[in-house]
Amino acid sequence: MRILVMGGTWFLGRAVVEEALRRGWEVSTFNRGRSGQDVPGVRPVRGDRTAAEDLAELASHGPWDAVVDTSSAALPPKDVLTGARALKAAAERYVYVSTVNAYRGWPGDPLTEASELLDGPPDADADYGRLPEDWTGPDWYYGRQKAGAERAVLEAFGEKCSVLLRPGVILGPGEYVGRLPWWLRRAERGGRVLAPGLPGKSIQPVDVRDVAVFALDQAAAPVGGAYNVVAPIGRETMGGFLNACLEVTGHRGELSWVPDAFLVKAGVEQWTELPLWRTHAGVWNIASDGAQAAGLVCRPLAETVEATWRWLRDGGLPVAHPRADEHGIAARKEERLLEEFAERVASGFEGERL
């Protein structure tokens, strides 16, 4: 296989490149060269994917069997459409990494790969779907942008030659968002660790290396499709995840479970102050039957935790990203909440559940 990776220097893009090279494939990458280092063995092409002249120059380096697009999270649909059109004559297939946010029902409703997508035209600009500043509902802006970008790929390459991957949360070595690294550092610090909700709550993060393998398998497949790239429902739990974090960091901490209702009433920011914690019914109820039938295999979450800790312990540093600053509860606030909850329990609070 001869592939082009849009991005290719950090986290998922890097994992895709490394896996493709391991398979003996010929890999070109396209990026600005500003964040992350090229993986040895690739053929880098420098440029800005929003510049027409750079895209034309890129296309001249083809042909490729497939494009794997890992770097358009911040691009509006119109830029994805322009890029896909520029590469149509130089590539047979297009694998686009989207998100479960593209579904109208996420995170409130259970989802399947046939669930309704949000609106979002393929030529929408960055202003399409912006929400009021006081908006407190689902993040429809980002979802509309990604749904539009999916339609942009389909318009340029057609259904048979388009693969749309919809991950939920991706974890693993190189993670730049900071969810798993925060929990690992918190476990390393020890003491009483505020554990949110119920230990048996199902969660569905997927390892970055498994996403990379599946993306490349689909790049080589003879058909297109749209897939939810998440771990199977019910296999992994919040309790198993947090205990794995404690285990790999030396068992310095002790989990103190606090009910959802208490945390919500206390105003704890879901998804960020306590990463991976969210009370919405559909956030971890995403069916991935189509992806599993197409070959998606998700390693145990404990393996992802161990590999990420090994990466951190060996000096691994993620590419700097502003989203990392959003994650993690302040130590004093965590301690105060644990003390307040202990007082409530002592006074007869039964821990009603949402």
Image (tube, grey):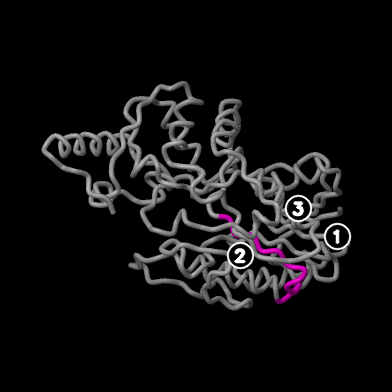
Q: Specify few, some or many for label 1: CA neighbours under 10 Å numbering under 14, 14-19, or 20 or more.
A: many
Q: Quadrant of the C terminus?
A: bottom left
Magenta region? 155-167
Which badge, 2 or 3, is on the more N-terminal residue?
A: 2
Q: Specify few, some or many for label 2: CA neighbours under 10 Å numbering under 14, 14-19, or 20 or more.
A: some
- Residue 243, by quadrant, is top left
Residue name at image x 50 percent, y 39 percent: 180
Local secondary structure at mark 1: strand
Residue 92 on image: x %, y %: 83, 66
The residue type indicated by label 2 comes to Leu
Residue 156 falls inside the magenta stretch: yes
Residue name at image x 51 percent, y 51 percent: 233
- Asked whether the residues under the numbered discs 2 and 3 touch, taking CB atoms below 8 Å apart as contact, a structural biologist would say no
Circle 3 is placed at which residue position?
217
> Does residue 125 appear to the left or right of 45 in the view shown?
left
Residue 148 on image: x %, y %: 59, 73
Asked if 40 appears above or below 321 in the picture, the reply is above
Circle 2 is placed at which residue position?
75
Circle 1 is placed at which residue position?
64
Residue 35 visible in the snapshot: no
> Does residue 270 appear to the left or right of 157 in the view shown?
left
Q: How far apart are the alpha carbons under marks 2 and 3?
A: 25 Å
Residue 119 on image: x %, y %: 53, 76
